[in-house]
Amino acid sequence: SIMVGPSGLFRIRNLPYALGCLIVFFVLALLSQQQQQQQPVKLISSRRAMADPAAVVEELKAKGHLETTDVAGYAAVTKASRMIMFTGSKDGSPLTSWCPDCNRSLPVVMSCAQSSGIPVLVVGVGDRDDWKMDARGASNPFRKKDGLALTGVPTLLFMDAKGEELHRLTGEIENERDPAKMKEKIEEVLKKVY
């Protein structure tokens, strides 16, 4: 309990207990923050939540319609007609990201790849500090003007068989909160370019 002494100062009667509670509070806050940084993605179709996101990813991989890579591996990627999704992760995971907007859009892109049959390559731009401008992001190779000149993640590119960019979605998917509307935007582009 807290008591006020004659001098007007507060005194905690059970200091070890109070310090223990404070330590537990800070540990729980740190754990919560770490979980928010790498949240698994829930795959969403425009009509319902999909029961098993890993199954959709495995199906795409089994059909040869999903590849993943990181910054270093991107240069070796072969040119092909496909979607390329740049996401906030180190390895190009289609299931986890430190980026909340990527977590929201990855499931929709996977759903579009599944329903359209258009292959998708998921490219990780690196850890958060490798991308964000307040850290080391200015030197990220995907940001360079003579390269892809990406300004944000998620970014979805639509490529032809020669490796030429046909269309790009950035803010259209980054700022869209409704998965059904996001899916409509992606499907519109798919119909237009493929």
Image (spheres, rainbow, N blue to C red):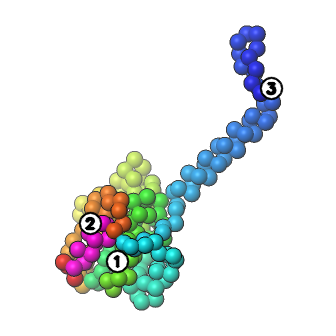
> Distance from label 1 to label 3 (Cα)?
61 Å
Q: Residue at x 52, y 77 (%)?
A: 52
Q: Amino acid at mark 3?
A: Arg
Sort mark 1 into few (<14), some (14-19) or many (20+) by Cα contacts within 10 Å: many
Number of the label disc, if any, that sits on residue 13: 3
Using the image, determine if residue 94 lies above or below residue 98. Answer: below
Q: Earlier in the sequence, mark 1 or mark 3?
A: 3
Q: Residue at x 21, y 71 (%)?
A: 167
**Which secondary structure, mark 2?**
strand
Quarter of the image where one finds residue 92: bottom left
Judging by the rendered image, the residue that carries numbered circle 1 is 112
Q: Residue at x 40, y 69 (%)?
A: 106
- In the image, farthest residue toward the front: 47
Horizontal side of residue 9 vs 131, given as left or right: right
Chain part drawn in magenta: 181-191
Judging by the rendered image, the residue that carries numbered circle 2 is 169
Q: Amino acid at mark 1?
A: Cys
Sort mark 2 into few (<14), some (14-19) or many (20+) by Cα contacts within 10 Å: some
Query: For residue 96: magenta?
Result: no
**Which secondary structure, mark 1?**
helix
Query: For residue 185: magenta?
Result: yes
Horizontal side of residue 32 vs 180, given as left or right: right
Sort mark 3 into few (<14), some (14-19) or many (20+) by Cα contacts within 10 Å: few
